[in-house]
Amino acid sequence: MSAAGLQLAKDEEVLLEEAPAVLTNRRLIVDRARDGEEPEWEEFPLKDISLFKKKNGGKEGRLELGLKMGTAGIVSILLESIVPGLPDLVDVALFLLGAVGFLAGTYTLVSTFLGVKPHTAVSIVILGERDKVFVLPGHDNPAADKITQRFSQARRRL
């Protein structure tokens, strides 16, 4: 048994254990369960894996930028409404700038809360099958680099 509670063969040794994956000298074992669920292990023999692909996904939150743009838009519209006697061109320009700022800020805030969080997706390419994917949090996750590097080393030893 490894630290992850997995059954290992007699001549099998754990090379790397980075959540959600365990890499041994014979296979890659990935936990497919979501946070808070029971582990759901899926294993892939190293000899069947032809390639690893890493890709960043999701977007960084831009809460502060959205708040600034929305506030600037509201201030511009209020300024246009409160100050009397502005020339028509300035009046229209302040209103348009305020409306654009408010809408852009609102869009940025909504996309921050509803958008996909930053992550690194690692695709396991197995010839003749669909790619298997597991996800690690954050862009350029160092665990993905470690898994890829150790996989290459283990694959050369086969």
Image: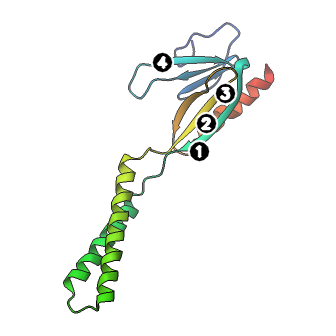
Quick check: marks 4 and 2 in contact, CB under 8 Å? no
Q: Which mark is residue 28?
A: none
Q: What element carries label 1?
A: loop
Q: Earlier in the sequence, mark 4 or mark 1?
A: 4
Mark 3 or 2, closer to the camera: 3
Amino acid on which disc 3 is placed: Val
Residue 86: x %, y % from top left: 26, 91
> What separation in Å lies between label 3 and label 2 (alpha carbons)?
15 Å
Q: Name the residue under label 1.
A: 140
On the picture, is 66 further left or further right than 43? left
93 to 48, vertically: above or below: below
Q: Which residue is drawn at 21% across and 81% down?
A: 81
Q: Which residue is drawn at 23% across and 77% down?
A: 78
Q: Which of marks 4 and 2 is nearer the N terminus?
A: 4
Viewer-side residue, 104 vs 48: 104
> What separation in Å lies between label 1 and label 3 (alpha carbons)?
19 Å
Amino acid on which disc 1 is placed: Asp
Q: Mark 3 points at which residue?
A: 125
Q: Earlier in the sequence, mark 1 or mark 3?
A: 3
Quick check: marks 3 and 2 in contact, CB under 8 Å? no
Q: Which residue is drawn at 64% across and 28% down?
A: 124
Q: Mark 4 points at which residue?
A: 40
Q: What element carries label 3?
A: strand
Q: How many C-alpha atoms fall within 10 Å of the one at disc 1: few (<14), some, or many (≥20)?
A: some
Q: Residue 144 carries which label?
A: 2
| Residue 1 sits in quarter | top right
